[in-house]
Image (spheres, helix red, strand yellow):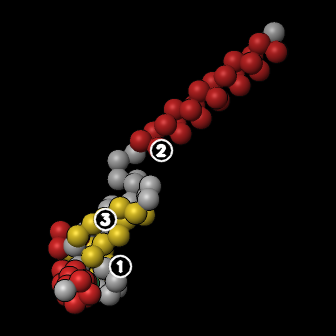
C-alpha cells in the first residue's frame, strides 16, 4: 500500500514538473525580442536592419552590408575589372 501511494505521489510530481516546465517554455515573451538594429559587417556602424543588405554565409552566419560599404565595394570592383 505504501509503495502504491509513493508511486502515485511520484507520478503526480512528474506530471507537475512536466506541466510547469511546458508552461515555462511556452510563456509568451520569454524569447528575447529580435533587435531592429544591426551592425554592418564591414564598417561596424549600426543601422536599421531594413537599411542593410543581408547575405547568408554557410549554414548559419548572417552578414549585413550597409549601402556605403556596397558602394565602395562596387567602386573597387569597377576599378579592378575596367
Ligand atoms: Zn558598412
Q: Which residue is denoted by mark 3 in the rendering?
A: 55
Location of residue 39 in the rendering, given as x and y in whole percent from the top left corner:
32, 79
Mark 2 and mark 3 lie on one chain; the one further toward the N terminus is 2
**Residues at circles 2 and 1 in contact by the CB criterion of under 8 Å:** no
- Bin the neighbour count of mark 1 within 10 Å (Cα to Cα): few under 14, some 14-19, many 20 and up: some
Q: Is residue 74 above or below residue 26?
A: below
Residue drawn at (18%, 68%) of the image? 50
Location of residue 6 in the rendering, given as x and y in whole percent from the top left corner:
77, 21
Label 1 lies in ligand 1 vicinity (Cβ under 8 Å): yes
Location of residue 15 in the rendering, given as x and y in whole percent from the top left corner:
59, 27
Residue drawn at (45%, 39%) of the image? 23
Foreground tag (2 vs 1):
1
Instruction: State which image quarter holds ligand 1.
Output: bottom left
Quadrant in the picture for residue 59: bottom left
Tag on residue 41? 1
Q: CA distance from mark 1 to mark 3?
A: 10 Å
Q: Which residue is denoted by mark 2 in the rendering?
A: 24
Amino acid at each position: 500500500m505504501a509503495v502504491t501511494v509513493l508511486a502515485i505521489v511520484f507520478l503526480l510530481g512528474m506530471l507537475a514538473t512536466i506541466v510547469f516546465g511546458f508552461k515555462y517554455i511556452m510563456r509568451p515573451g520569454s524569447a528575447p525580442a529580435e533587435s531592429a538594429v544591426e551592425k554592418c559587417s564591414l564598417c561596424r556602424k549600426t543601422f536599421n536592419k531594413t537599411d542593410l543588405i543581408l547575405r547568408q554565409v554557410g549554414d548559419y552566419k548572417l552578414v549585413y552590408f550597409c549601402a556605403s560599404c556596397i558602394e565602395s565595394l562596387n567602386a573597387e570592383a569597377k576599378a579592378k575589372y575596367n
